[in-house]
Amino acid sequence: MKKTSLGAVLLMALFAPVLLIGCAASEAEDRSLNDIATSPLFERVETIHIKETDSLHIADFKKAVVTLDPFRIYIPDFRLHRIAVLDETGQLTHFIGKRGTGPGEFRFAMNVIEHEGVIYGVDRQDLVLAFDPDGTFLHQLTPEKRLDVASRGQSTLMRDGRFYTSVSKREIDSAHFFAIMDEDLNLIGTFGDRPDLWHIDQPILGDAFFDFFPDGRVAVSAAMGPDVWIYDLSTEPATLVTSFRYDAPTYRPVSEPIASDIYAFDDALETFYTSHEMTQGIWTVGDSVVVMPYSRYDREFYEEDYSKEFIHDYAALMDVSGAVLETVSLPGWILTKDAQDRFYVLRSYQPDARIIDIYEYRGPAS
């Protein structure tokens, strides 16, 4: 019989009651959640089946941008280093950019922005490449300082000729989440107080997301927890208007140490289970509603670094006072929201069988 160390026993004793209670609570809480398909605040208005072939296909993506006239879905494919373009039927019409280091080429296509008819591809190596909608390369922008643009969610947006991007704390400003830059990527300022938390510098856990209200206020969230901050960017410096927390037992933030760290402490701990939530973005609806999608990660760890992971997706709808309007379970990841407040949910991620459901928001917006 394999000998179990004292450290393993202590860890098992520490986590077992909490995890058992958490599992039981999760099952009860899940029954109280509304499915988005039956929610009174949403209506599924369309389903798009992505049509892929051996020569026209997408490898890996977590986000998208939609234009309505004409209807196009722009998907940054960070595995194949290009932006895929879909029409309303799900047909892949063309690709923008390719892998390389030359003009119009991506190291990694991490994000995409549409602004005034120009498609901007955000490269992981702190480059922004500008194209016309047909894929013709226009020009390249390089920031004056290394930004370490976040790899997920709404990490970079453009409004009124300015770029807004989430940044690492190494180069720009150790106190703030976001940088404001002009159209040439020259730094104008920073905003978004960075909480002094243990995991703020960790990959993914330090990601931050944001979206604009019509009046220019911006809603901010972060992967590390269920908090929302509302800033007024019309002032210099930006002013924090309000902040609130999605205070519900269905959201359990990541706590120190995370699962992979626990596993590394003592290899005599043969199996254990963890469950936590992480915020995946934030969107605004009208002038007072925020939609905060989040995922629950259930992980089972075993000997020899073997593990299983199960992901469950949700979205919390709140007004700017923090009052929860509804929490819905989702069939998959929210890719984006269009100008008509329709949410694009990736229901199936299976290659050659990817499905995007479009849900229109029908609830209060002010």
Image (cartoon, grey):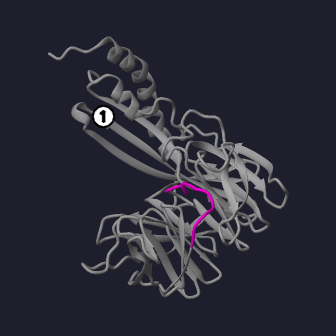
Residue furthest to the left in view is: 1
Residue 85 lies in what quarter of the image?
Answer: bottom left
Query: Is residue 323 something that shows in the picture?
Result: no
Quadrant of image for the C terminus: bottom right
> What residue do we see at 54% from left, 41% from top?
201
**Foreground of the two, 266 or 178:** 178
What span is colored magenta in the figure? 141-151
Q: Position of residue 238 (x, y in %)?
A: 80, 54
Q: Report whether 362 appears left or right of 365.
A: left
Residue 155: in magenta span: no
Secondary structure under badge 1? strand
Q: Position of residue 225 (x, y in %)?
A: 58, 42
How many residues crowd mark 1 within 10 Å: few (<14), some (14–19), many (20+)? some
Q: Magenta part mainly helix, strand or loop?
A: loop
Report which residue position mark 1 lands on: 301
Where is residue 115? Give x, y as percent.
63, 77
For the point 42% across and 28% down, which residue is it? Answer: 19
Q: Which x, y percent locates residue 29?
A: 51, 41
Q: Residue at x 83, y 61 (%)?
A: 234
View extreme (top): residue = 6
